[in-house]
Image (tube, grey):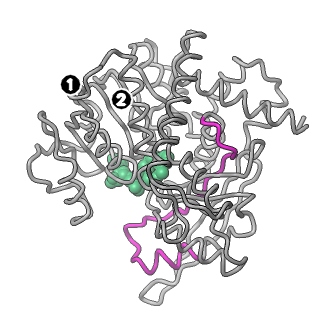
Amino acid sequence: MERPEPLEQMSPFDAVNCYFERAVELNGISSSMRDMLRMPASELRVEVPLRRDDGSVGLFVGYRVQHNSARGPFKGGIRYHPDAELDEVRALASLMTWKTALVDVPFGGAKGGIQVDPAALSATEKERLTRAYTRGICAVIGDHHDIPAPDMNTDAQTMAWLLDEYSQLNGWTPGVVTGKPVPLGGSEGREAATGRGCVVVLDEAARRLGWDEPGSVTVAVQGFGNVGSWCARIARERGYRIVAVGDERVTLHHDDGLDVDALARHHAREGTIQGFAGAEQLEPDRVLTLPVDVVVPAAVGEVIHIDNVDDVEARLVVEGANHPVTPWADRCLEERGVTVVPDILANAGGVVVSYFEWVQNLQQFRWEGARVERELRKRMTDAYTTVSTAAEENGNGLRDAAYGLAVAKVAEAARLRGAL
Ligand code: NAD
C-alpha cells in the first residue's frame, strides 16, 4: 500500500477531524453545520504562576478548551503533561463531544491541561499549581456550564483541590467537578470506571469474534495508571490472561499471565512497574507488538503508527487511551481485518460514571457501588451494540460507525436549538 504521508503527519486535532469529516459525509451534514461542529466554541489560555518550594517562581501555560455544548454542559478532564499543547487539548475536547453523544450522557465536550512535567513537582507544588489554574479558569467552569474531571497525571486529590478553590470563590459546589474523593461527593466506582468500561467492550468484542473462553484470550496493556491498571485488574478478574503490561520504561511479560494484583501492590509501593519480580523485562514499546490476541493502549496518544503498525499482531485493539492509533495505522489495521474499538467508545466508562456522580451531586443522593457498576455495564453494552449494529449495516469499521452516530446526534441537537 502506498504511504500517504499527510495522513501520518496530521496533528492530533486534524486526525480527529479526519474521522469527523467522514461522519459528516456519511450523514449528509451541510457545510455550515460542519464548520460549526468542527471548531471549539471557545479556548481559554491562562498563565499559571507557581511559587516553588524553594521560594522561586515558575510560570506555566494552561488551557481550557470548550468544544461543543449543544447537548449539555461542557465536560472533560484536565491533564498535566509536557505535551499538553493547544492542538492536543483541542483534539481531546472534540473527542469528548463525540464520546458524550455516543454514550448518550447529557454533556458536551471540553478538555483542559497544563504544560508541565508533574514528576518535577512536589505534592505541595502540585496543589498550588492546581489552585492557581482553577483561579484562572473559574470564570468559565460551573456545575451547569463546564465540569472538569481527572485525566493523565491528575487524580481524585487534584479534583479535591479544584473543588475547594472553586467553592471558596463561589460557595459549595460539588457538581463543578467529577472524579472527586468519595467523602467530598465523589461516586463509588468512578476511579475504576474507565478501565471497567474498557473490559465491558472487550467482553462484547471478544464475544463477536467467537472467543467464548476468556482464559484462552491473551491481553497486553500499555500504561499502568488509572485506565491501564484498572483495565488489567478487572480483565484478570474476568478470567483474561494478562501476559504483558508496559509503560515508558519497560514491558513486563509472562506467557502464563502476570499476577496483576501483586503488580498493583508493587506499583503502589514503588511508584513504577519497573523492578517487578516474576516477569521478563522487555523494551517499553514491545507491549504493543507481542503475539497476543488483544492490545489495550491505555497511556498516551499516537503509539501505534506508521513505523510499528505492521508489527502489531493482535486481532483486537481496545483504545483505552485517547487517539492512540494514527489515522494511517487505523487504515492499515482495518485493511488487515483487525477489530479496533475506538477511543470514543472504549474509554467512555469514565465520563459515564462522571455523569452518575454529577447526578448524585445535584440530587444530593448517593448510589451504592453495585448500582454504579450495573448501570455502567448497561450503558457501555448498549453503546457497543448500537455501534456494532450500525457498522454491520453500513459495512463500516467500528470507528466510522461510532463517529457517524455521535456526529449525527450533536448535529440534531444543534439544529433543534436553532443554531443554524
Ligand atoms: P495516568 O497518568 O493515570 O497513567 C498514564 C500511564 O501511562 C502511566 O502508567 C504512565 O507510566 C504511562 N505512560 C506515560 N507516558 C508513556 C509513554 N510515553 N509510553 C508508555 N507509557 C506511558 O493516566 P490515565 O488517566 O490512566 O490516562 C491514560 C489515557 O487514558 C490518556 O490518553 C487519557 O486521556 C485516557 N483517558 C483517561 C480517562 C480517566 O478517567 N482517567 C478517561 C478516558 C480516557
Q: Is residue 245 magenta?
A: no
Residue appearing at x 43%, y 35% in the figure: 319
Q: Going 22% across and 39% down the picture, which residue do you hit?
A: 244
The quarter of the image holding the N terminus is top left
What's drawn in magenta, residue-wise? 103-131
Quarter holding the C terminus is top right
Looking at the picture, which amino acid does disc 1 mark?
Answer: Ser
Residue found at x 60% / y 38%:
99
Residue 128 falls left or right of residue 339: right
The Cα–Cα distance between marks 1 and 2, rounded to whole angstroms, is 29 Å
Ligand 1 closer than 8 Å to label 1 CB: no
Give residue 383's quadrant in the image.
top right
- Helix, strand or loop at mark 1: helix
Residue at 65%, 58% (x, y): give it.
Answer: 147
Disc 1 crowd rating (10 Å Cα; few below 14, some 14-19, many 20+) is few
Dot label at residue 216: 1
The reply to whether discs 1 and 2 touch (Cβ–Cβ < 8 Å) is: no
In the foreground, 216 or 365: 365
* 121 relative to 43, above or below: below
Label placed on residue 307: 2
Place residue 148 in its image quadrant.
Answer: bottom right
First in sequence: mark 1 or mark 2?
1
Q: Residues within 10 Å of mark 2 (few under 14, many from 20)?
A: few
- Drawn side of residue 60 relative to residue 198, left or right: right
Looking at this view, is 292 or 19 the one in front? 292
